[in-house]
Amino acid sequence: MPDVSLRSQTVPLSPFRKLIPLADRARAAGKHIYHLNIGQPDIKTHPTAVAKFRQLPWQILDYSPSNGIDSYREALRGYYARFDVQLQADEIMVTTGGSEAILFFMLACLDPGDEIIVPEPFYANYNGYAHMAGVTVVPITCYIETGFALPSADDFADKITERTRAIMITNPNNPTGACYSRRELVRMAEIVREHDLFLCADEVYREFSYDSPLQSVLQLPGLEDHAIVIDSVSKRYSATGARVGALVCRNLRVRESVDRYAKLRLSPPGLGQRLSEIMLEDDGAYLEGVKEDYGNRRDTVFRRLQRMPGVYAYCPGGAFYLFARFPVSDSEDFCRWLLEEFEHEGATVMLSPGPGFYATAGRGSDECRIAYVLNVDDLERAMDCLEAALEVYPGRTVESVGAEDLSGDLRP
């Protein structure tokens, strides 16, 4: 029997999905599971747009252009203009979700063996995409004690080698919810210009910045050849299944390189683009309501975590994730135990263990990501489960590591 590739056997597992078999068995046994492990909101996809989409006349679902439907890209120009970002339609390349945009960026801008510096904890699938592209992720650690702020310019400079080609950030951050200030981004801009690097910013949670408007790297002067933005409609409009993202870049050579890959896969999803274009037409009230809803969810989860002995929580400034430190020594085991052995009033909670969000071995062993994607009532019940679980978990430590010297009320 021929063997499969080493690459396929060594690709990192998604920390969001690797516990799914345990969840399936728990559900089959009759447990209700509160899914806080993955960014799948329970908010309805833009209802007005969905109603209009259902009335679209079409008889043949044909290929769209490899870089996206022209009318949708023109509509995106208007969308970015809301954030004082002036673009040409050709500077927007539509992709099959933000995931493909990330992979296209790595394939177009880095060669096998090249290095990309990524502040950790980071979106766990960056590890997988880098593995697929043969790229080495060089982590630079951010800490909950500082609100996951970006490290200093000197810290970044210490990571730069002759193989470094890019720095990648997520703003607002997944998994921490941290939002980076203009001062931090200006510092990043100075670094990439000085060392002639790319700065790739994953801005898919742009709308969900609760305390101040998001600063995009596309707004920074002097980065025309350096800045690349990853975007997606998945979380913005609660349309994860549309699979429509974008890679936005003013650098012509980068776009030409990305276009080669885009042509090979023929086209991004046509139906998803048409839905996305309609969602852009009338999204003000929808997005305002969604942002307010997520703000209430954030406050609910943070308030409950503050009351749990030994838990050290950071109040996120954006996205819909909270990355917290728990009084456990092995968060992988804790998340497994929640599904296999724990039950509270017929239910349990599913979290994402922390190690999957790091490239540095050993980090995240006492941390978990909570995706507050459920309504407030369900979140209250999920927190009831989590609080009860921490009281009886056999692997509980006295308190979360490092919390003895810090207040649990850490706000950005």
Image: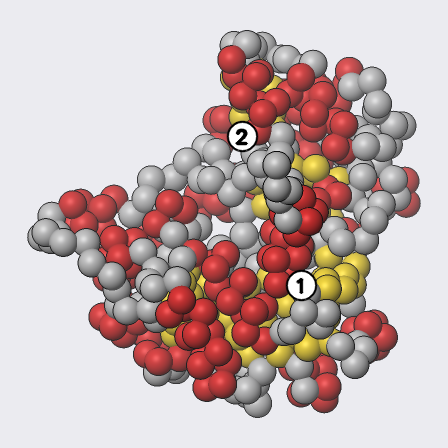
Query: Closer to the camera, 412 or 191?
Result: 191
Q: Are marks 2 and 1 in contact (CB under 8 Å)?
A: no
Up-down relation of residue 114 to residue 301 (above or below): below
Query: Closer to the camera, 335 or 110?
Result: 110
Farthest front residue? 1
| Residue 262 as seen in the image, left or right of residue 126 | left
- Residue occupying image coordinates x 78% and y 19%: 393
User: Residue 50: x and y, percent?
Assistant: 22, 46
- In this rendering, which labeled residue sits more in front, label 2 or label 1? 1
Label placed on residue 179: none
Q: CA distance from mark 2 to mark 1?
A: 32 Å
Which image quarter holds the C terminus? bottom right
Q: Which residue is mark 1?
A: 134
Kindly state the secondary structure of the residue where label 1 is placed.
loop
- Residue occupying image coordinates x 65% and y 37%: 352
- Residue occupying image coordinates x 54% and y 62%: 103
Q: Is residue 85 visible?
A: no
**Sequence order check, earlier mark of 2 and 1:** 2
Badge 1 amino acid: Gly
Q: Is residue 136 visible?
A: yes
Neighbours of disc 2 within 10 Å: few (<14), some (14-19), many (20+) = many
Q: Which residue is mark 2?
A: 35
Up-down relation of residue 324 to residue 230 (above or below): above
Badge 2 amino acid: His
| Residue 231 as seen in the image, left or right of residue 176 | left
- Residue occupying image coordinates x 64% and y 13%: 343
| Residue 347 as seen in the image, left or right of residue 411 | left
Neighbours of disc 1 within 10 Å: few (<14), some (14-19), many (20+) = some
User: Residue 263: x and y, percent?
Assistant: 37, 70
